[in-house]
Image (spheres, grey):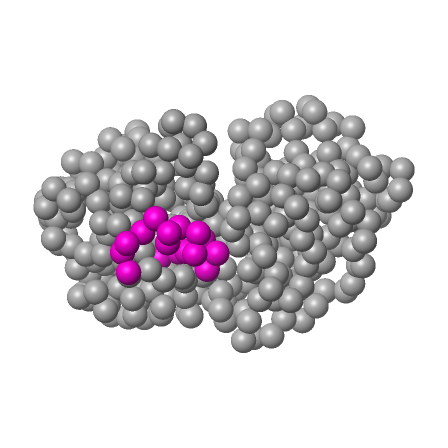
Amino acid sequence: MKRLLIFLPTIGYGGAEISLTRIAGYLSENNNIKVDLLVAKKLDKSLEVDISRQLNITYLGSKKTILSLFKLLKFIRTSRPDVILSTLPTPNILLITLKQLRLIKSRVVIREANSNYLYWKKGLLNKIKGIIAVFAFNKSDANIFISQELQSNLERYISNKQNTTIYNPVFSHDFFEKSKEQVKNFKIPNAELWVTTSRLEHQKGLDVFFEASYSFLEKRNFSILVVGDGSLESFYKNKYSDLPVTFIGNTENPLKYLKLADIFFFPSRREGLGNSLIEAQILGKNIISSDCPSGPKEIIKIFNNGTLFKSENINDLIEAIESIELKEDRDVSKEIVDKFSVEKVSEQYFQLLNNLI
C-alpha cells in the first residue's frame, strides 16, 4: 500500500475523528506511505492537536457531508489511493455508493464505532438507516469494529467475512503529561469529586446520573464536574441547578480534569467502546459505568476495575454509588495500556489495510 485516503465528515472533538487523525499521523510518519486526510466540512472548533505535519489535509467545503459526493469522487480520481478508510454513517454510504457504481477502483474499508444500528427496528427512519448501514457493511472490502461486543452484535447481519475488532488509540505518548497539567479554571472542592467527560446528548445518559445524585445531597459531601458540551447543555444547567454541579464545556485536554476525579461516571445509554472510560481506567480511577451496549463491560473486564449498573436504571446506579469502596488511583500494567496505544492500534490498521492490496 503506497497511498491511503481517510475520509471524515469533520475534524472535531468526537472519538471517531480523534482516533483516525491519530492513526493517520502515525501511519504517515512510520510506515512509508502517503496519507491523505479528506474532510467534508470544517468546523469552527477543528481539532488541530494530534495531527501530523506529514498529513495532507484537504477540506471539501461542503455544508453537509451528504452533499460532498461529487467533490469526493473528483478527489479520489485525482489522488488514486490504494485504500480508502471511512467512519461514521454518511461517509461510509457515500463511498459504498461510488464503489457499487464502479466509479472508483480503490479498496474501501469501513470503521464502525457506534451501536445505534442495534436499534434500527425502532422507528421507520432508524430502520431505513439500519438497512442502508448493513448494505454498506456487506459491500465493503473489510469492516473494522471498535469493540468485540459491537462486532458480535452486528455480524449477524453481515455476510462479509473480512470483519475484525481493533480498539481505539486512546493512549498517546503524552497521555500522562497531559493528565498532570494544572487546572486553572476550576476550584477543587473540599468534597468527593464526581467527574464525567461526555457530549451533553441524550445518548450519554447524564440525566440518569443527575437524577441519581439527588439521593446523596443529604448523605454525602460531593461535587459534580461535567467536561464537554452539546445540545442539552442549557437544559441540564437549568433543570439541575440545585445540584452541586460545574459545567466546564469542551476542552482540548479533558485528562487534567479526569485526573482530579474521586469517582468517574460513565452513564451512557449506548456506545461503540467508550474512550473516556478507557482514559479513566488508564489513570486508575474508581469507576461506575452503565452496562450499555457496547464496550463498557468489555473494558471493565480488560482492566479488572469498575462497577456496572443497569443502563437507564436510576435505582441501580444509586445502589452502585452506595456500595462503591473508594481507593487510591491504581497502577495499570503496560501490557494492558498497550492494547489502546497509538502505536499498537496503528500497526493493526496497517496490517489489515496493507493485506487488501
Residue 175 in the image: above or below residue 98: below
Q: Position of residue 27 (x, y in %)?
A: 32, 65
The image quarter containing residue 357 is bottom left
In this rendered view, identify the residue nearer to me: 234 or 50.
Answer: 234
* Residue at image location 41% in from the left, 56% down from the top: 151
Range drawn in magenta: 144-161
Q: Position of residue 329 (x, y in %)?
A: 72, 64
Q: Is residue 218 magenta?
A: no
Q: Position of residue 318 (x, y in %)?
A: 77, 43
Res 145 seen here: yes
* Residue at image location 58% in from the left, 29% down from the top: 232
The image quarter containing residue 284 is bottom right
Q: Is residue 159 magenta?
A: yes
**Left or right: where does residue 291 sit relative to residue 110?**
right
In this rendered view, identify the residue nearer to me: 89 or 250.
Answer: 89
* Residue at image location 79% in from the left, 35% down from the top: 214
* Residue at image location 53% in from the left, 43% down from the top: 270
Residue 292 in the image: above or below residue 176: above
**Left or right: where does residue 51 sit relative to residue 85?**
right
Split into 4 quadrants, where in the image is the N terminus? bottom left
In this rendered view, identify the residue nearer to me: 199 or 53.
Answer: 199
**Left or right: where does residue 277 sit relative to residue 322?**
left
Res 5 seen here: no
